[in-house]
Image: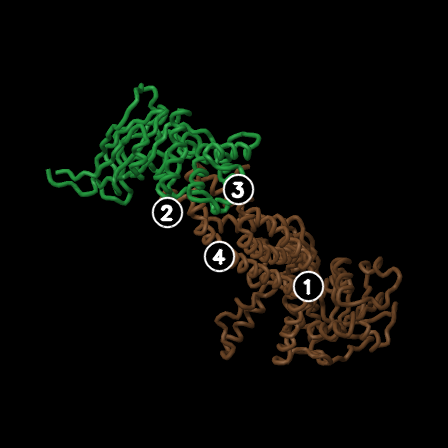
Chain colours: A green, B brown
Amino acid sequence: MANKKKNDYVSKDKEVKEKNTSPKDIILSIKNANYRYSDAEEDDYALKNVSFDFESGKIYAIKGRSGTGKTTLLSLISGLEKCTEGEIIFDGKSLKSMNLDKYRNNDIGIVFQSYNLLPFMTACENIILSMDANGLKIKNKKEKAIELMEKVGLKASYANRKVLRLSGGEQQRVAIARSLSYNPKMIIADEPTGNLDKQTETEILDIFKKLAHEENKCVIIVTHSQNVCDTVDKIYNLKKVQEK
Amino acid sequence: MFILKNAWISIKRNKGRNILIGIIILIIACACTITLAIKNTASDLINSYKSAYEKEVTIGFDRENMMKDFDPSQKEERESAREKFDNIASYTISDVLKFADSDYIESYYYTYGVGLNGNNIEKAEIESNSNMSNGFGHGKENNMSDTDFTLTGYSSEDAMSEFISGAYTMSEIVDNAWDIAFNGNYVFINEELASYNNLKLNDKIKLEDEDGNVYEFEIIGIFKENDEDNQESMSMFSNSVNTIVTNSDAVVNLTNGNENLKASIHPTFIIDSYDNVEKLQDEFYEKGLDENFILQTNEELAESGVSSVKNISSFSTTFLVITLIIGGIVLFVINMINIRERKYEIGVLRTIGISKFKLTMQFVSELVIVSVVALTLGAGIGAVSSKGVSNSLLANEISSSNEKTEEINKNFGGMNHGERGGMHGKGMPVVQAYDSIDAVVDIKVLLELLSIGLSLVLVSSIASMVSIQRFSPLTILKERS
């Protein structure tokens, strides 16, 4: 067979450590997912034949070199993009049949490397905004927001501070608190510690570990940090392979 | 609730931009309120003036058709035209009664005129060039210009009193004049004629036809032109000095059995709508009206009374359209800039699961909230200033129209004070029915303003709507990163 194009990809998973799990714990399953950008040629896939399973109560890392499709995979999982072929099953339902806006503000929480907070709002307002988007009916949303801030290691006095006046680590904690505001089953984080120092990275990873192991959430972290890979329960490695 | 709450937060956050949008919408709202108030009030005035103005139809020669292909330099053609003119079948009182029996006609009257010479009175000598009042209508003329007087008989009291009380005022009248006016040979004469012949009420005047038959009439009223200006303007084409007004039966009695005494009938039909004139004309032709006659209306005259108001209304409409186009473009551009500036915000909100619809509604709500406040203020300012602006515009329009008329008079020898004669109609100052509009902002104006304002807001929001539908949150956030 002739050489395939350079940007063809295959996926490969590598288990580092694994606990005993049963299929009923699988919260998210990616089945033979292919993704091709709308302006790409017919056989020019950004992701090809990706099949991963994610369980509740575990923390996962998706690693790979730049250009292997990590962020693309994350956008498929978070419902920001749709698979060209294959499917993603969340809690027994295909994302294709779900309202993806509702999925994003109810079932999953997303944390970005660049935090993606609204700079004109305070830390507390950013968290409340997410609660509002979810339609959460809580009497005192501010109280709940402060509670979440404290949970991720932020002082309550930061509640009314504009996010731009917070450090990178603090902003990331606000972003995590925001993603937890409606108690999702799964947290997806794209390079969440990419902009942080080692100490803060460890603290943020501790939060994620707690969320997975103590609150039975599934945490998926896209990363190329070895420190993150050392912390997680399982690593999926995306590789760019040139087939012959 | 989430949409409104977020919209309100965004408005407070972007004070500068929203104040700018508010000012633009306020200006548009103010201009719209004034122009809509002027337009609606002007439209009401025009309609009420037109509905109060009787829609009159008279029968006249189709001169254009008759003169078609006519070469006056050819003797043969002149003779043939004269022959053709003589052969036109005229219409009689019975024809008029037949014509008047139509669904399109609300009422009618006619004048029956005959030319006679004086027997015991003399024709009042004036500088006018005709002794026939043009106001008595059209029709096949007899040899009235060769006689001293025109005896004009009115078919109804209304028509007669309307004629007399329109351009004239009754200066003297016998007590029971209107009781007897239609019951015999009673006449109303012009004050100038009375003075010239030293006539007074209850005097008897005698008129004779060309065969020497003498007819006697009793004077029961003396009328005069309303005022100096009117006298001059009217006398230009309506010399009533030697016109003697009576009832139509009196004229009919004169002409009965006297074939040499030819009278002309000038019917006037009051119709329900100018739109039906063509249908009425066809009906008249079917009923035997010669096709060399056509129906003529007083629509132009009715229109001329409100021409300035119409001009103001039309100016307002143009101004409104221009304001809306410019305002719409400016708002559209501001919205485009707004969307570009808030792209990141859109990306974040979409990522945390806010639907495109909710986001679109939030952006539209922001604009609607600002617009409603600005529209309310604009409507208030517009309401306060609309009266002054409309009257000032109308005053300018009337003054400019009068200047134009004076210019025409100067250039084309139209009527000046102290001069008589001149071109028929040309240079005649148009008497405006209204010299003030007093544009009022009513509920109709407010509703129109609201619908225009909201439509403008929605149209200018298209940029944000389309952008929100098109933006990929991931792309936005990647760009930001």
Q: Mark 1 points at which residue?
A: B391
Please name whichever residue, B334 or A150, is drawn nearer the observer in this view of the structure.
Answer: A150
- In the visual, does A79 lie left or right of B20? left
- The image shows residue B397, relative to residue B38, as above or below, that is below
Number of the front mark, 1 or 4: 4
Marks 3, 4 in one chain: yes
Number of the front mark, 3 or 2: 2
Residue type indicated by callout 4? Ile
- In the visual, does B167 lie left or right of B312? right
Instruction: Give the mark nearer the N terminus: 1 vs 4.
Output: 4
Instruction: Give the mark nearer the N terminus: 3 vs 4.
Output: 3
Residue type indicated by callout 1? Asn
Q: Mark 2 points at which residue?
A: B481
Residue type indicated by callout 3? Asn
Marks 2, 1 in one chain: yes
Please name whichever residue, A119 or B445, is drawn nearer the observer in this view of the structure.
Answer: A119
Q: How far apart are the alpha carbons under marks 3 and 2?
A: 24 Å
Judge the density around disc 2: few (<14), some (14-19), many (≥20) Cα neighbours within 10 Å: few
* SS at mark 2 in the image: loop
Number of the front mark, 3 or 4: 3
Q: How far apart are the alpha carbons under marks 3 and 1?
A: 45 Å
Instruction: Give the mark nearer the N terminus: 3 vs 1.
Output: 3
Q: How far apart are the alpha carbons under marks 1 and 4?
A: 30 Å
Residue type indicated by callout 2? Ser
Q: Mark 4 points at which residue?
A: B329
Q: Which mark is residue B6?
A: 3
Judge the density around disc 1: few (<14), some (14-19), many (≥20) Cα neighbours within 10 Å: some
Instruction: Give the mark nearer the N terminus: 2 vs 4.
Output: 4
Marks 2, 4 in one chain: yes
Q: How far apart are the alpha carbons under marks 2 and 1?
A: 60 Å
